[in-house]
Amino acid sequence: MSIPELTRVSELFSYRNGELYAEDVPVRQIAAQVGTPFYVYSSAAFSERYRRFAAAFGAERPLICYAVKANSNLAVVRLFATLGAGADVVSEGELRRALTAGVPPERIVFSGIGKTAQEMTAALTAGIHQINVESVPELHQLSAIANGLGRIAPVVLRVNPDVDALTHAKIATGKKENKFGIDFDEAAAVYRLAKTLPGLAPVGFAVHIGSQLVDLEPYRHAFSRLAELVRAVRDTGLAVDRIDLGGGLGIRYRGECAPKIEDYAQLARSIFGGLDVSLAFEPGRILTASAGLLVTRVIYVKQAKTRRFVIVDAAMNDLIRPALYDAWHDIMTVDKPPLTVEFKPADVVGPVCETGDTFAVDRALPSLAPGDLIAFTAAGAYGAVMSSTYNSRLLVPEVLVAGARSAVIRARPSYEALLALDQIPAWLDQGAVAQPHRRGVA
Ligand SMILES: *Cc1c(COP(=O)(O)O)cnc(C)c1O
């Protein structure tokens, strides 16, 4: 099978006739339809990323479980499912999303260190592909539940290879001091234990050492340790059929030199090719980040003594990555800046009452005026999914484009719906307050 000519993701968000388009749809037109701020995703970009990931493994056809937490909109999960992806889920909610989006249960893996009894029951009842177990207490719990349901849980042990992923500390997961996985040195013994417990079928091992990895060396290290573990366990007479290599592949947000998917695939194949195991991957960010923009409108431009503040209608509750990880997102103006325009530094900030509500500091931007639209790029992963309603701000809409088509895939809720989530207890529900405050009484 020949690989089709790949579309460059960057071409899917580009200027035409002086304004920014998402595929064949003007971003300004979407803003007029749904209001700002909003997320917009390119179907072609999602598809291109997935196909490229799958193609990098050629005929081996590993199980590619899209890490739903990167962008869990049902339409996005459905799109990946139609391309053949499975799903990596970390909660009952994500399990339900994957199943609702049409991911076959036999392509779903369940990860995470704190699965509850209810979540295990849901996973076993759905008959998913495997449960990635991260501790001995979790193993006992799963055994009890599977046994009670009269089912056999396919178990993969997630091991902690004690490898420095060389990424932001908050998203590094593979060092022994991190909360994730079973200590490498204990993994073989825990696998043997799993073999003795009722209701469990230990079938392999998993690693996931962190997110936004831009260096292949930590992968090489972790994968090699895992291969060593497979051999050691097999030497004791136990079968190991599956290896799950997690996700974490980084993208270029700023100047990073992100690894090529093909090199990553080649690395995995070179280490596991001769081991006769079936491989699984859990990519999230690499499939989605570059496929999304967060579009926002300038509310005010405030020229303080030493700085220019561009105050926009998006805030940290809509895109928390800059506040949480000091993340960088490129900014594009929706109007293409004229070639002669002068770029000057500006801080781009949201309206929330926290200094952390800052998207960019000293960013070179053309002059901007209230009403102008700007877009944060590479916002398709860990964007909308991490949003909240802090400051009683409404969750922002998500829009999916495909060629000249566009559809709202999550609408902005109403204030009524937001307020309806709260309830006033009966003992406070006495109608008018007895002593209203008076204003302006001298
Ligand atoms: C978050 C996570 C992933 C996906 O990570 P990306 O960096 O988005 O690829 C995969 N597997 C597990 C277990 C995770 O926790």
Image (tube, rainbow, N blue to C red):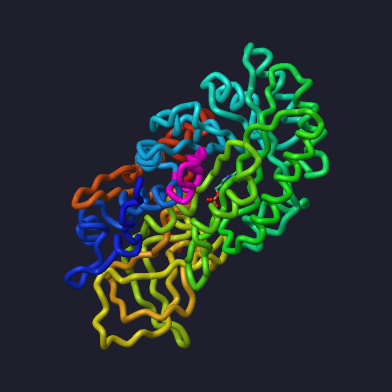
Q: Nearer the viewer, residue 385 or 250?
A: 250
Looking at the rendered structure, the number of numbered marks drawn on it comes to 0
Q: Nearer the viewer, residue 359 or 124?
A: 124
Answer with left or right where residue 399 lies relative to residue 126.
left
Q: Nearer the viewer, residue 276 or 23?
A: 276
Q: Quadrant of the N terminus?
A: top left
> Is residue 389 shown to the viewer in this render?
no
Q: Quadrant of the C terminus?
A: bottom left
Span of residues in magenta: 55-71
Q: Residue furthest left?
A: 17
| Residue at image point 55% right, 28% down | 129
| Residue at image point 49% right, 56% down | 261
| Residue at image point 68% right, 39% down | 158
Q: Is residue 11 above or below residue 187?
A: below
Residue 246 placement (x, y as % from top left)? 59, 45
Residue 172 placement (x, y as % from top left)? 66, 56
Residue 286 placement (x, y as % from top left)? 47, 54
Answer with left or right where residue 395 lies relative to residue 111.
left
Q: Is residue 35 above or below residue 230?
A: below
| Residue at image point 44% right, 78% down | 363
Q: Nearer the viewer, residue 157 or 221?
A: 221
Answer with left or right where residue 359 lies relative to residue 33.
right
Residue 156 placement (x, y as % from top left)? 66, 33
Question: For residue 28, which quarter of the picture?
Answer: bottom left
> Is residue 298 shown to the viewer in this render?
yes
Is-magenta flag for residue 82?
no
